[in-house]
Image (spheres, grey):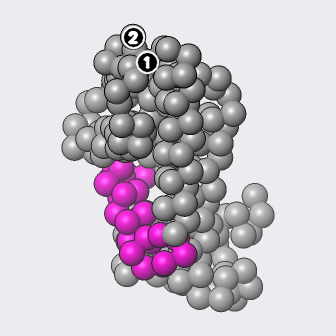
């Protein structure tokens, strides 16, 4: 693993567990076995390192969304792929860290802090979600034009509802850790489809 990647991995875990304010470059150096100069060779300060860590998450999220949108051909397929993604997101983002005391709450705190702290990140998150809602709207309109789903739905609100249901379920998994997201995802997709299909 390259030094930069090693620094990012350790810093991501540090920021995730302790938050921005309580994390320290000294602690990251110690865990990475790298001098401060080694970190400052790649990042000019703690703030830039934090932004780089947040960027890793955003790129991963954008990649998942793009891959999913490219691999589905209709609304029903999308629903099952999208809600099936919840389990993957939890496993890859929340489970990959294997940090003692880590929970999805740490992840959400980090993302919300980043969005509050950095207008550019807020814009990037906003753009990603807007694109997702727009893509879902296209799938809904296509399904309506083919007579597969009800015609009397507010397309924009239905797309927004899907994204909110996904994110809300992930947040619920923070509070109810016993949730089986694979099972819940399948059931949510089936339930949503059954409500809108003709």
Q: Report whether 131 appears left or right of 43.
A: left
161 relative to 30 in the view: left or right? left
Please report the residue visible at 49 percent of the width from the left and 23 percent of the height from the top: 144
Residue 39 lies left or right of residue 58; in this view the side is right
Residue 94's place in the image compared with 50, above or below, is above
113 over 132 or under it: above or below: below
Range drawn in magenta: 98-122
Please tell me which of labels 1 and 2 falls first in the chain.
Answer: 1
Vertical position of residue 176 compared to residue 104: above or below: above
Q: Which residue is mark 1?
A: 149
Q: Give the quarter of the image for residue 170.
A: top left
Q: Residues within 10 Å of mark 2 (few under 14, many from 20)?
A: few
The label on residue 198 is 2
- Image coordinates for residue 197, horizontal then vertical, percent: 40, 14
> Whole-percent x and y of residue 43?
67, 82
* Residues at marks 1 and 2, CA–CA distance in whole angstroms: 5 Å
Res. 174 in view: yes
Which residue is pictured at 41% across the width and 43% down the height?
156
Extreme-right residue of the structure: 2
Q: Position of residue 115 (x, y in %)?
A: 43, 70
Asked if marks 1 and 2 touch (Cβ < 8 Å), the reply is: yes
Q: Residue furthest top?
A: 198
Percent x, y for residue 106?
35, 58
């Amino acid at each position: 693993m390259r030094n930069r990647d090693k620094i990012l991995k350790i810093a991501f875990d540090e920021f995730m567990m302790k938050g921005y304010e309580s994390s320290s470059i000294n602690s990251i150096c110690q865990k990475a076995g790298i001098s401060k100069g080694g970190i400052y060779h790649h990042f000019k300060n703690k703030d830039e390192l934090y932004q780089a860590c947040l960027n890793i998450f955003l790129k991963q999220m954008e990649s998942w969304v793009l891959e999913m949108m490219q691999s589905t051909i209709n609304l029903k397929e999308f629903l099952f792929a999208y809600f099936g993604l919840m389990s993957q997101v939890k496993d890859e983002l929340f489970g990959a860290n294997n940090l003692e005391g880590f929970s999805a709450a740490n992840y959400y705190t980090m993302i919300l802090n980043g969005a509050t702290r950095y207008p550019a990140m807020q814009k990037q998150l906003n753009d990603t979600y807007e694109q997702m809602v727009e893509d879902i709207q296209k799938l809904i309109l296509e399904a309506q034009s083919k007579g597969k789903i009800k015609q009397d739905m507010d397309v924009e609100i239905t797309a927004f509802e899907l994204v909110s249901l996904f994110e809300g379920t992930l947040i619920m998994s923070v509070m109810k850790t016993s949730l089986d997201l694979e099972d819940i995802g399948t059931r949510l997709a089936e339930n949503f489809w059954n409500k809108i299909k003709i």
